[in-house]
Image: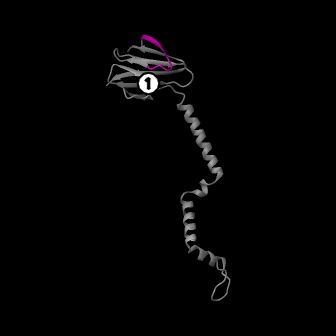
């Protein structure tokens, strides 16, 4: 593209403002303005900064660490199509609702627990029986005698109630 520096009719040199006005009327000038507008709409003048990107990465890393510490350190009952599971925060108890009388439960156990102790309690909190499972085993819970269970691995403990659908 050729750039004119002087007026063809009078011979005067173009000012910088006149040059910019002429450039803004060309296809290249229009594309540049669209890119500038897009930069403001996308907040590129903020998000393009290295400090901003570093701060965002640091905040995300701190948040991920916080979530891992708070949620990843709890023993949980894994979901299954054979039953519905709910956790009640006020009583800190798990409720398993299943149509059958016996349910096999898989647990998420953080840490290095090798054994899981299962204690069955009756309605008066008297121990009916105790069993020990390997951490990888599925645990069989029965709802035939209206029992609730205490499942313990290392220092983590779950209280589980079974309800028949």
Question: How many numbered discs sit on the rendered protein?
Answer: 1
**Looking at the rendering, which quadrant does residue 148 occupy?**
top left
In the image, residue 25 sits, relative to residue 126, either above or below, namely below
Q: Is residue 146 magenta?
A: no
- Pick the front one: 160 or 29: 29
Q: Name the residue under label 1.
A: 93
Residue 29, percent across and down? 58, 71
Q: In this view, does 160 lie to the left or right of 1?
A: left
- Which residues are the magenta region? 127-138
Please report the residue visible at 54 percent of the width from the left and 25 percent of the height from the top. Answer: 110
Residue 32, percent across and down? 58, 67
- Pick the front one: 56 or 11: 11
**Looking at the rendering, which quadrant does residue 144 occupy?**
top left
In the image, residue 12 sits, relative to residue 94, either above or below, namely below
In the image, residue 104 sits, relative to residue 130, either above or below, namely below
Q: In this view, does 110 lie to the left or right of 6?
A: left
Please report the residue visible at 45 percent of the width from the left and 23 percent of the height from the top. Answer: 106
């Amino acid at each position: 593209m050729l750039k004119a520096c002087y007026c063809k009719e009078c011979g005067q040199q173009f000012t910088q403002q006149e040059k910019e006005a002429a450039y803004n009327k060309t296809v290249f000038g229009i594309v540049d303005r669209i890119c500038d507008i897009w930069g403001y709409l996308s907040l590129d003048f903020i998000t393009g900064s290295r400090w901003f990107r570093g701060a965002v990465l640091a905040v995300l890393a701190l948040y991920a660490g916080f979530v891992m510490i708070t949620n990843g350190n709890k023993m949980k009952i894994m979901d299954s199509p054979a039953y519905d599971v709910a956790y009640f925060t006020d009583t800190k108890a798990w409720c398993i609702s299943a149509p059958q009388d016996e349910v096999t439960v898989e647990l998420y156990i953080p840490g290095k627990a090798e054994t899981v102790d299962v204690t069955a309690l009756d309605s008066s909190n008297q121990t009916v029986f105790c069993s020990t499972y390997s951490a990888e085993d599925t645990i069989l819970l029965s709802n035939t005698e209206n029992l609730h269970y205490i499942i313990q691995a290392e220092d983590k403990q779950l209280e589980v109630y079974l309800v028949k659908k």
